[in-house]
Amino acid sequence: MEEHENSESLKTEPEFDRGVLLHQLAEREKALEYYNGILAEEPENGDAWYNKALTLHGLSRFYEAMDAYDTAVKFNPKDSDAYYNKGVIQSELGLYSDAVESYSKAIEADSGNIDAVFNKATALLQLKAYDEAVKVYDTIFENDKNNVSAAYNKALALVQLERYDEALASFDIVIQIDPMNKEAWYDKAHLLLRTGKTEDAKEAFSMTIKLIPDLPDSWFRIGGIFAVVGQKKESVKYLRKAINANPEAREWAKEDLDYESMRNDADFQNLLESGDAEIKAALKDTEQV
């Protein structure tokens, strides 16, 4: 699930130029001092409160930042960015119900704030309010037919609702927009397998493998895919490469669901019990064949 980050746009009135420059230079303590100086003289300056909040946000002083955003909207009730950025902090802190409320206020202030709409849906997913999330993603997609993230996250929500045919259709939309989207191919393949469409699942897994680069951090996942489709020798081959690159892959394989069918396989068990020197030797033998 993807989430959009906070808005980095400061309110750039001429008198705030110095503060904006300090913020952009990551001189946030100095920027904070500057905005405090402005607010000492103009305590009802909503833009200064917003910029102070954004600066506090950048300093990871989250609760102070939320208080400053609240003050900002007292003086600028239509400041969609302030509501939105408060929601981002709440999402970061795991306060998803509060985040939904903040994103809703941001949308009310500016219906064109697409980031707020998207993040509201993501927060709803975290709350397992899947039906509501699907409705929000539909709203996004109505206005942007090429929004891959909305289509993909909608598919994930539909899987949770066990509306599998609709989920497959959403994965297909993602793939239609972005044919090289390996995550969509991978998740679609698993869903096809779950719904008994084995041959279609194998084709989707095959496409996933083509899209995953032949790199150390990919070998573990490729091995898992081969395990799922029953190609045990290929699974062991790639898992061996993954363990050689990162010994922690041994422990991952014990828990990863893609390797579940391999749990009782002798070659799989031997691989997990092999020492690093044995794995390196086996890899050399494989390369020489």
Image: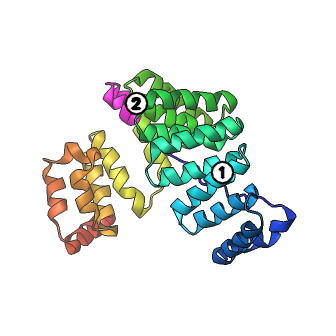
276 to the left or right of 188: left
- Which residue in the structure is indicated by mark 2? 159
Q: Where is residue 212? Give x, y as percent.
A: 47, 51
**Residue sitting nearer the eye, 259 or 6:** 6
Coloration mode: rainbow
Q: CA gap, disc 2 to disc 1? A: 33 Å
State which region is magenta. 189-202
197 to the left or right of 59: left
Please, what secondary structure does the residue beneath circle 1 have? helix
Q: Which amino acid is tagged 2?
A: Val
Number of other residues with Cα within 10 Å of mark 1, as a class: few under 14, some 14 to 19, many 20 or more: many
Residue occupying image coordinates x 28% and y 61%: 249
Q: Where is residue 166? Give x, y as percent.
A: 47, 23
Please tell me how many numbered marks the rendered image carries: 2
Q: Where is residue 284? Give x, y as percent.
A: 29, 70
Residue 188 lies, with reference to residue 88, above or below; the image says: above
Q: Which amino acid is tagged 1?
A: Ala
Residue 89 lies, with reference to residue 103, above or below; the image says: below
Magenta portion: prevailing SS class:
helix
Within the magenta stretch, is there residue 144? no
Please, what secondary structure does the residue beneath circle 2 have? helix
On-image quarter of the C terminus: bottom left
- Which residue in the structure is indicated by mark 1? 82
The residue mark sitting in front, 2 or 1, is 1
